[in-house]
Image: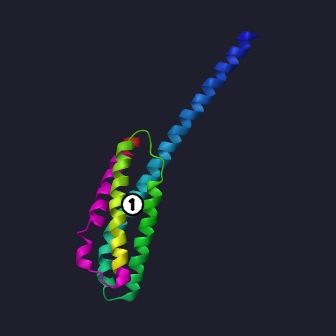
Amino acid sequence: MKKIAIAFLMFAAVVISGCSMLEGVNNTLNYANEATEYANEVSTFVEEVPSLAEQAVTDEQAAADLEQRMEDMKQKINEFNELEEPSVGADLHQQVVDYNHQALSGIDVYLNNIENGTLDPSVIENTEVFQSLSEISQTVDQLTQLVE
């Protein structure tokens, strides 16, 4: 009877640890997918927003679109920051979060400029927002390669 109980406990321990390991793999894969999606969104934002900012100086609809794109990016940044970091690549995740904080600060400056009517499109490409977002794409690419 003791042998059966011990065998059952050993089997249960193996199943439980296997489930835990499988869950860890699933979490890592989910993180990699979300990080890749985020990097794609950041790249699209960096490519499209400068020309939209140029239009926003003279076009109220473009200014409203720019403001919405900035707000959407802020939301995406905050969602990424809340992701549970993988055990592998935690330092790269933290780098992305740090870049995200810089980008959020810059986005807030642009949103204030839009609201005050003082938007200067020539500045948009040379700010921390786009430099930080460019770094985010590169770092996320490294991170997803590491966790996949």
What secondary structure is marked by label 1? Answer: helix
Asked if the magenta segment contains residue 133, the reply would be yes
Residue lying at the far right in this picture: please name it: 1
Q: Is residue 123 above or below residue 101?
A: below
Q: Nearer the viewer, residue 147 or 121?
A: 121
What is the x, y in percent for residue 95? 33, 50
User: Which residue: 35% across, 69% down?
Assistant: 107
Q: Is residue 21 above or below residue 33?
A: above
User: Which residue: 36% across, 77% down?
Assistant: 112
Magenta residue span: 114-143
What is the x, y in percent for residue 86? 44, 42
What is the x, y in percent for residue 3? 71, 10
| Residue bearing the label numbered 1 | 40
Q: Quadrant of the N terminus?
A: top right
Q: Main secondary structure of the magenta part?
A: helix
What is the x, y in percent for residue 125? 25, 71
Asked if the magenta segment contains residue 46, the reply would be no
- Residue 100, located in which quarter of the rendered image? bottom left
Q: Amino acid at mark 1?
A: Asn
User: Which residue: 30% across, 81% down?
Assistant: 119
